[in-house]
Amino acid sequence: PGSINSPRPTPAAIDAELNPDADPINGYNLLFNVESEEGKELFCTYYLDENRIVDDSNLETTAMQAKALIEYFLAFDVTYDAMPYIENDMYLLGGSDDILVPVGGLRYVADVAPYPWFTLFRGARHAPFYQYYDQFMTILETFLALPNN
């Protein structure tokens, strides 16, 4: 959850999100650890997929990202206090190597929310459902099949 208490993104992640002139590879490094061989392979598979959805960066999207980051870390401090009162099951997904939204916030929610399902994929970045698609879909389908969901 976003809060003044949330773990901060790394400087590289902030640059990738907010600098319209940033090296495009830095943006993909948010999704895949392109410093590792596995991450490079996943990036290439993703990039060459003709069916992928692409939202090209421009000044409008950069401004929206800046606003989202400010709101995430400053405007919604009450989110932390509300977590214990959520009445429904909650699926939390994170990557252990996420440089944009470090997993500290997810760990907090998993500790205080009444009914959390927390999946942390080792070595994954901000979008672990790309790197661990089959495992993610199995867990998500199981979660959604629960009687309360």
Image: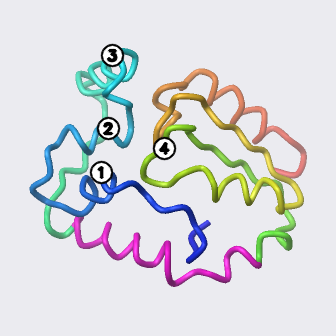
Q: Amino acid at mark 2?
A: Asn
Q: Amino acid at mark 3?
A: Glu
Q: Secondary structure at mark 1?
A: helix
Q: Examine the rendered structure and indicate whether residue 110 appears above or below residue 66.
A: above
Task: Confirm or deny contact between disc 1 and disc 3 (CB under 8 A).
Answer: no
Q: Secondary structure at mark 2?
A: helix
Q: Earlier in the sequence, mark 2 or mark 1?
A: 1
Q: Secondary structure at mark 4?
A: loop
Q: What residue does disc 3 label?
A: 41
Q: What residue does disc 4 label?
A: 98
Q: Examine the rendered structure and indicate whether residue 40 appears above or below residue 102.
A: above
Q: What residue does disc 1 label?
A: 12
Q: Residue at x 31, y 21 (%)?
A: 40
Q: Residue at x 53, y 52 (%)?
A: 102
Query: Label 4: how many residues lie within 10 Å, few (<14), some (14-19) or many (20+)?
Result: many
* Magenta-highlighted residues: 61-81
Q: What residue does disc 2 label?
A: 29
Query: Label 2: how many residues lie within 10 Å, few (<14), some (14-19) or many (20+)?
Result: many
Distance Cα–Cα, label 1 vs label 3: 21 Å
